[in-house]
Image (cartoon, rainbow, N blue to C red):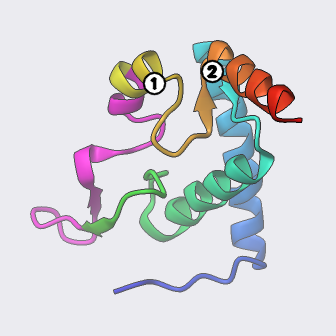
Amino acid sequence: MMQKLDMSSPEFLKELEKTKKFTDKVIKQFGWEYHPMEDVNEGVIMGLARHKVLYGKRFCPCFMVDPDPVNEGKFVSADDRVCPCPPAIEKEIPEEGKCHCGIFCTPEYVAEQAQKTMESL
């Protein structure tokens, strides 16, 4: 069942600010860059903040979150996709240049996207 959340509530807005700082820290720690399309980053950050408020962890917003069948009151997601998730760190970003959600990218991926944009103008 989909849980509802007032995204203009003080609780959510505070978590949104914390999540932005969190993603800034991840970018710096791994030497990545944000996706060149700001709306991608905004959507993912909002999704991460929403999951943190609703489920207690920054589960990847691109995957379903379900009640943990073993631990009542806890939640899980496919492949335990808690940001930054192991599949992104170990496979997606090194091989594809970006994580599944698209927020975290290699500098090379960002440069490639910028080149494609310039060529299409």
Q: To which quarter of the image does residue 36 belong?
A: top right
Q: Is residue 36 magenta?
A: no
Estimate the x, y position of residue 76 in percent, counting from the top left: 27, 58
Please, what secondary structure does the residue beneath circle 2 have? helix
Estimate the x, y position of residue 94 in percent, counting from the top left: 44, 16
Residue at the spot 45% in from the left edge and 60% down from the top edge = 56
Estimate the x, y position of residue 107 in percent, counting from the top left: 68, 15
- Residue stretch in magenta: 67-89
Q: Earlier in the sequence, mark 1 or mark 2?
A: 1
Q: Which mark is residue 20?
A: none
Please identify the residue farthest to the left as the structure is shown.
70
Residue corresponding to mark 1: 96
Please identify the residue farthest to the front as the structure is shown.
120
Residue type at mark 1: give it.
Glu
Residue type at mark 2: give it.
Tyr
Residue corresponding to mark 2: 109
Please, what secondary structure does the residue beneath circle 1 have? helix
Residue at the spot 66% in from the left edge and 36% down from the top edge = 23
Q: To which quarter of the image does residue 2 belong?
A: bottom left
From the viewer's perspective, tell me whether residue 13 is left or right of residue 84: right
User: Which of the image's four quarters has the C terminus?
Assistant: top right
Please identify the residue farthest to the right as the structure is shown.
121
User: Which of the image's four quarters has the N terminus?
Assistant: bottom left
> Quick check: marks 1 and 2 in contact, CB under 8 Å?
yes
Residues at marks 1 and 2, CA–CA distance in whole angstroms: 8 Å
